[in-house]
Image (cartoon, coloured by chain):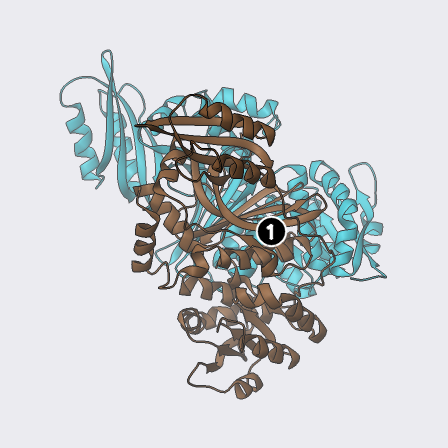
Chain colours: A brown, B cyan
Amino acid sequence: MAETSEVFRVGLLGHGTVGGAFATLLEERAGAVAATTGLRPELSGVLTRSRGDFDSILEGSDLVVELMGGIEPAREYVLRAMRAGKHVVSANKQLLSQHGEELWAVARENGVQLRFEGAVAGVVPVIRVLQESLAAAHVERIHGIVNGTTNYILSEMARSGISYEQALGQAQELGYAEADPTDDVTGRDAAAKMAILARLAFSTPVHLDQVAYEGIEHITADDMAYADELGLGLKLIGTAERVDGGISVRVHPAFLYGQHPLASVNGPFNAVTVESDAITEITMSGPGAGGPQTASAVLGDVVSAMIPPASTPETTEALPLVGDVVSAFYVHMEVADRPGVLAQIAEILGMQGASIKSFVQRGLGDNARLVMVLHPLLESRLYAAVRMIAQLDFMRAAPRAIRVIDEDFS
Amino acid sequence: MAETSEVFRVGLLGHGTVGGAFATLLEERAGAVAATTGLRPELSGVLTRSRGDFDSILEGSDLVVELMGGIEPAREYVLRAMRAGKHVVSANKQLLSQHGEELWAVARENGVQLRFEGAVAGVVPVIRVLQESLAAAHVERIHGIVNGTTNYILSEMARSGISYEQALGQAQELGYAEADPTDDVTGRDAAAKMAILARLAFSTPVHLDQVAYEGIEHITADDMAYADELGLGLKLIGTAERVDGGISVRVHPAFLYGQHPLASVNGPFNAVTVESDAITEITMSGPGAGGPQTASAVLGDVVSAMIPPASTPETTEALPLVGDVVSAFYVHMEVADRPGVLAQIAEILGMQGASIKSFVQRGLGDNARLVMVLHPLLESRLYAAVRMIAQLDFMRAAPRAIRVIDEDFS
């Protein structure tokens, strides 16, 4: 235990929800940090929209914490801090998923650390585990629930049978969703996080623009009810995986069987599963966001930076991003209830190599609703089948397809 | 990426299941490690019971991996390696839970790293998360399923209604339990792991001898059936928590409600939940043991040691270990089926401040079986009540009490 406790000066950029929580937490835990590191952390300056001056904060700090969000001026400040030889801790997923390679290169060139645990899944330590525990592992796949807002909405739809709009309204009232929820509900927020995780897992450059994403706005209460009947739960799942010598990184709603480790993650929680031959599978879960939680992840990074270095190594792979992957699907169809309908649908499915795993049919007066789960097939072939089925004259609504994560957990 | 790849020499002590798997994995991943660290790891020597010489292995190594198990000569070798200025990676929970303070002190004095992720919960990165991500957090409590053998046995008893003896036999056939399963089924193995986790979480010295443990040998198929009826699942749970200015570290069977994050951890898996005000709760799970999995944790430590230091800081707290804690309980009683029985039991419970949360009674000819869940109370008072109830003349068998982890996860 250090008795003298030299001061370690922390400059803070941004003082919103996370920034404010970080300032409070830093003061509260300064004594404990001093006991662990021998250095007592102190806020040396705070930059907000209305006050503070970046140059003088930079000069007076040993480390800079960037919690402003957005691309500029965050990018410029982070670059300038690192070029001045300061370590940086950031929770800015947009910045890292779009300018990560530039930033990591500057960190390496200047021998400083750039840490970012808070950028993905809040306090769930997935960044550290990928960068350190699994630095030498051959990661095969990551599945993640990395957006708490959409997980809350889907959990509520499943729990109380309410519509997407009602669940979104509820999330907004409780502060789990913002007034403009676009980034969350379209899957773009999750896509940024998956780009960062894929970069670390596969040591290959991944930019947000390379991540295909699909949101949850089109999910209906009806899908949830059928899912329940089929023993499935619906989540917004981010996937980063090796496929045919390349990788696929994507975000979309997906059904999971009850035994899947992500199936029981409910409410505004995040969880990530990392698979590799040697480790089989690790799952980590916890609160995905919230000021104090993200602030805690940021403080963990600050403390690590105070002890010793770990830098993001250069990319050592240049893996192609694969567009078309294999998936199981749930398909929902409303048809006129007359003879020959199922035969025609089955013929189209067969042509595309799709085979039916489970099937529910229900009468609705003159119409019928057909819901089926298909065994895994190439997504391009499934969508070709869906387009052909949509043309059939007995269809009463556009057919809808949602992925099913169908793995053996027995 | 380093083109030259200098060699980093790894000396290996022990070549059993984990040692053999580590040697294989190291060779397999040497190229990836070189790409990440700029150094190419190579086995410089292996010590087994029948071959190898410690002195020459020590001299020829930059880092020593200890996978022998047991106290001596592992302790002597680890101490000598650190005194010679070498980093050490160990997966030896017995050694660390009994001689940890001595070893960590020598590591600090010699400025070397002693890493031990593989000692607790295999590849689940709980050591790193406690030492690094949560270095500045005020951890309130850890709950863990840290023994895969007992978790497999309990899962099988719950799943197929078989007896403890049958499930143990099955575990032995599948290689999940050893021929002599004493350390696992008595809870001693889990106690060693909880001692290590408590030391890291609370920065206070914790020795294996200070951990109270209770095993699963007395659990019956009948307990499992009642648990199911009451909506509970049974696990062997390790707990390390702050209590009244001190800490309590213990291992015992406990019932969990279905929503608890550990309730769905089945088979030979491990999982750990860490609670703290700022982070709320993180859960990590994965395969608890197995050669390749533990070897993977060991390799993660080796890679971290190749990059830069992280040392276990001195203990900064000296917290008393609290013996008597509050817990909810399941109580199972077989009584003669006659008037006044429940009244007498209820009176004793009332005297000890116990109140009933749920209750199941079932007739068995002239006898009746009473199963109840009690609201939380001091363990000493519960056991006093159980001793008094055992004296009642209408009791047909010794009453049995098992803890219930009763938390609000709504």
Which residue is depicted at the point 31% across and 33% down? B330
Left or right of residue B251, residue B366 in this image: left
Which residue is depicted at the point 83% across and 39% down? B51
Left or right of residue B351, residue A296 in this image: right
Q: Is residue A207 above or below residue A218?
A: below
Mark 1 crowd level (few <14, some 14–19, many ≥20, 10 Å Cα): many
Task: Compare residues A226 and B350 and report the one nearer the observer.
Answer: A226
In the rendered image, which quarter contains the N terminus of chain A? bottom right
Occupied quadrant, residue A229: top left
Residue B322 percent location from the top left of the image: 39, 51
The amino acid at mark 1 is: Val
Task: Compare residues A134 and A202 and report the one nearer the observer.
Answer: A202
Residue B279 percent location from the top left of the image: 43, 59
Q: Which residue is mark 1?
A: A249
Q: Is residue A278 above or below residue A22?
A: above
Residue ranking furthest to the front: A393
Q: Is residue B73 above or below residue B137?
A: above
